[in-house]
Image (cartoon, rainbow, N blue to C red):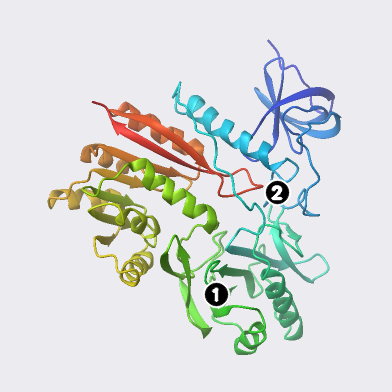
Amino acid sequence: MGIPVEKNKTYELQIDAMGSTGEGIGRLDGFTVFVDGALPGETVRVLMLKVKKSYGYGKLLEILTQSPERCEPRCPVAKQCGGCQLQSLSYQAQLACKKRKVQDDLERIGGLKGIDVLDIIGAESPWFYRNKAQFPVGRCADGGCAVGFYAKRSHRIVETPVCFLQDECNEEVVRIMREFMAEYHILPYDEEKHTGLVRHILTRVGKKSGELMVCIVVNGGGLPHSAELAERLQVVQGLASVVLNVNQEKTNVILGRKIIPVWGKDTISDELDGLSFEISTLSFYQVNPAQTEVLYQKAVALAGLDGSETVLDLYCGIGTMSLFFARKAKRVFGVEIVEQAVKDARTNAARNGILNVEFAAGAAEEVVPEWVRNGGAADVVVVDPPRKGCDGRLLETIMQIAPEKIVYVSCNPATLARDLAVLTDGSYQVRKVQPVDMFPHTVHCEVINLLQKEK
């Protein structure tokens, strides 16, 4: 059977699903078509822009039948900016789509049939929830300075005067930085030529403490007049830290390894569920603290601890989830590859007076076997990997440890499904799947999974 569509021709299409980047998905005689801007439940007219063997991409020309869940985006540049993919969809419909995506990935990628995915836990406040912002700084076509966020699938900066997901203090920080750069003729970064000085403006906010960190990422050894910048920034409420981050590599990675303190502390503090944390520039810390409390509380609850367990926390970061588990377990052993994060984790344990937790620096697939050889054993393994999922060797190590329970926290349902397929082939059963919406108005969500050893 031939391909039922041709490039540069128009077609009418029923949208029945949502893709991994928020695009609508429809089918014509079994042929899959991806359409940016179309929502599930809509009938649309599209122009075919690209045609492959089994799928193609169409440009949305007209919405013939509109979804009742479609709404006007709050942000005026939501359709251009790549940060929010779902502002055109009502929040309740967003939650339904995310739950369906988790279910589909488990079945399609993981081959896991009959898994009951619990209703996703939505955010009480889906706006201005982020405690971390990373604004790219670049050159406009007219030679001016652009500050905002990248457009979809590109590194073209969309000017973003207000972001409705970030903390509201960022508007003033960006305004001051723009004026400072203009006054002192400091050039924004040119990604193609690898010239210019200021690459990113990064902010971190302690939602409970009210403390603010401003970090300027520079393509050089310093920033002229940085003390003057710090003085100007002190009008922003809660300012506690101004630092520079040196990144002179020609890379898409935002932060380099070198931090230069300019003013105030080099960390800020925050609190989660009564636990206090010190957060440095390079620390991993969940961006939605209100939902982080929900996520970690639910993870501990699903583990069903009675106080006698040894818990192994892999990819433990600065120890946030480790400390949540330590309040219910006999002992927690955390492993993290970033040495600074391990130092922060030890500091956080000490500042909270939690003594039944210890941390080790290194790759989990190397540290854990050594720990086992020295007599270590775990009743529960907690794993919270980056978006790429778990290293294959780590999954093998977990199955060799053979804990009674595994609590797998994932920010990517696709790699989660892949890893669960390995673990369920290795004598574990998925008992609970609980999505949590950590990132309203985007396609992303977190998923907590409880796996139990087969009897």
Q: Do the residues bearing badges 1 and 2 touch, measured as CB atoms within 8 Å?
A: no
* Front residue (pair 222, 310): 310
Q: In x, y percent, where is residue 289?
A: 52, 58
Q: Where 319 falls versus 187 (above or below)?
A: above
Q: In x, y percent, where is residue 450?
A: 37, 37
Q: In x, y percent, where is residue 231?
A: 63, 88
Can you tell which quarter of the image residue 47 is in?
top right
Q: Which residue is mark 1?
A: 211
* Quadrant where the C terminus is found in the figure: top left
Can you tell which quarter of the image residue 327 is in?
bottom left
* Quadrant where the N terminus is found in the figure: top right
On the picture, is 61 further left or further right than 204?
right
Farthest top residue?
1
Q: Which residue is mark 2?
A: 152
Query: What secondary structure is found at the residue carrying circle 1?
Result: loop
Residue in view at x 39 percent, y 63 percent: 318
C-alpha distance separating marks 1 and 2: 31 Å
Q: Could you tell me the amino acid type at mark 1? A: Glu
Q: Could you tell me the amino acid type at mark 2? A: Lys
* Front residue (pair 360, 197): 360
Q: Earlier in the sequence, mark 1 or mark 2?
A: 2
Query: Is residue 28 in view?
Result: yes
Q: Where 5 falls versus 77 (above or below)?
A: above
